[in-house]
Amino acid sequence: MGNRLYVGNLSYSTTRETLEQAFSAAGEVREIAMPTDRETGQPRGFAFVTMGSASAATNAISQLNGVMLDGRTLKVNEAQERPPREGGGGGGGRGFGGGGGGFGGGGGGGRGGGGGY
């Protein structure tokens, strides 16, 4: 078992300090990461807690999984490693050129599409 834990079902009002207090009862807390929404900056309702050892991580799971914190029942388990992303880099799209409809070319529309006054 690793040292990194996933902590789910967090209240949006839960702080790093609150998590550190709760998890330090199980052992040394090395790091707490609380992802936030890119657009709003609000917490996303979960965190990753890295404990000082595998035994501290095991203790934290047994002591804190299912416990109420800030009005919510915590879900604490070993964090799963994210699978590597496929392909890398930008995705299909057409970039800046081609693809019809843009500027230039196209013919006709708008005022004075032919003929005179």
Image (tube, rainbow, N blue to C red):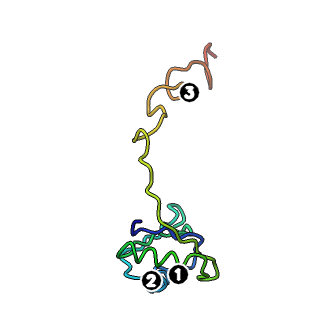
Position of residue 82 measured from the top left corner of the image (x, y, whole percent): 45, 54
Disc 3, SS? loop
Disc 2, SS? loop
Residue at the spot of label 2: 26
Mark 2: few/some/many CA within 10 Å (<14, 14-19, 20+)? many
Are the residues flagged by discs 1 and 2 in contact, CB closer than 8 Å? yes
Residue at the spot of label 3: 101
Quarter of image, res 4:
bottom left
- N-terminal label among 3 and 1: 1
Quarter of image, res 32:
bottom left
Looking at the rendered image, the disc whose residue lies closer to the viewer, 3 or 2, is 2
Q: In this rendered view, identify the residue nearer to me: 40 or 71.
A: 71
The label number, if any, that marks residue 63 in the structure image: 1
Along the horizontal axis of the image, is 109 left or right of 34?
Answer: right
Q: How many marks?
A: 3
Residue at position x 53%, y 69% in the image: 46
Quarter of image, res 108:
top right
